[in-house]
Structures are given as structure tokens and as C-alpha cells.
């Protein structure tokens, strides 16, 4: 499960590699949520194509690199 080293968030992360398709979507075109056990339980597609979603499922540690809570990119994966 990812963890933000700045605020301790372990639940909500976004991808700096996928820009938001619309300005009011925030910084990321892809946002994911994790349960307390570290399982990916939900993602918000904000303009990502099918291939991008498949990449998220295949390599979430590569794509989910920013904390939605504080905006930090100081995210670690076990």
C-alpha cells in the first residue's frame, strides 16, 4: 500500500503522469483509493483511455505517485 511521507495518507493517490482533462478536476486525470488492507478499491477516471486504466491495474506503484490529501510527490510503496 502506498503511503505519503508528508501527511501519512494511505488511502487516496493520484498520478502526476496523467494530466486532468478538465481544469476543475484538479491535478490528476487518474485518482485511486485504497482500503486499510492496501487493496485498490476504487479509481476515478478523469480522461484516461482504456490503455491507461490497464496500466494502472498492472503497475499502480508506477502511476500513483502523488498524494491527493496534501499534494506531495513524496510517496513510497512497500
Image (cartoon, rainbow, N blue to C red):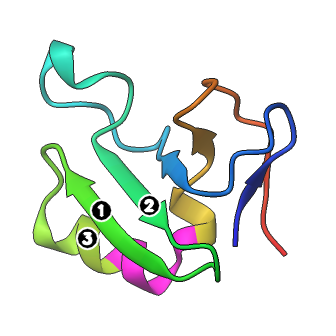
Query: Where does the image place residue 57, in percent across and percent down from the top left?
Result: 39, 81
Separation of marks 1 and 3 at Cα, in angstroms: 9 Å
Mark toward the start of the polypeptide (1 vs 3): 1
Most common SS among magenta residues: helix
Q: Residues within 10 Å of mark 3 (few under 14, many from 20)?
A: some
User: Which quarter of the rendering shows the C terminus?
Assistant: bottom right
Side of 53 where 14 appears, left or right:
right
Q: Nearer the viewer, residue 20 or 51?
A: 20
Marks 3 and 1: in contact by CB < 8 Å? Answer: yes
User: Which quarter of the rendering shows the N terminus?
Assistant: bottom right
Q: Nearer the viewer, residue 11 or 58?
A: 11
Q: Quadrant of residue 23?
A: top left
Residue where numbered disc 1 is placed: 43
Residue where numbered disc 3 is placed: 53
> Residue 33: which numbered mark, if any?
2
Regarding mark 2 in the picture, which secondary structure is present there? strand
Read off the magenta span.
55-60
Regarding mark 3 in the picture, which secondary structure is present there? helix
Residue at point 57% right, 56% down? 11
Foreground label between 1 and 3: 1
Marks 2 and 1: in contact by CB < 8 Å? Answer: yes
Query: Where does the image place residue 31, in percent across and percent down from the top left?
Result: 36, 49
Q: Is residue 24 magenta?
A: no
Amino acid at each position: 500500500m502506498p503511503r505519503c511521507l508528508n501527511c501519512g495518507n494511505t488511502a487516496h493517490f493520484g498520478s502526476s503522469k496523467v494530466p486532468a482533462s478538465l481544469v476543475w478536476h484538479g491535478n490528476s486525470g487518474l485518482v485511486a483509493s485504497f482500503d486499510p488492507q492496501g487493496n485498490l478499491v476504487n479509481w476515478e477516471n478523469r480522461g484516461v483511455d482504456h490503455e491507461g486504466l490497464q496500466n494502472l491495474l498492472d503497475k499502480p506503484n508506477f502511476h500513483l505517485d502523488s498524494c491527493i490529501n496534501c499534494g506531495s510527490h513524496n510517496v513510497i510503496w512497500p
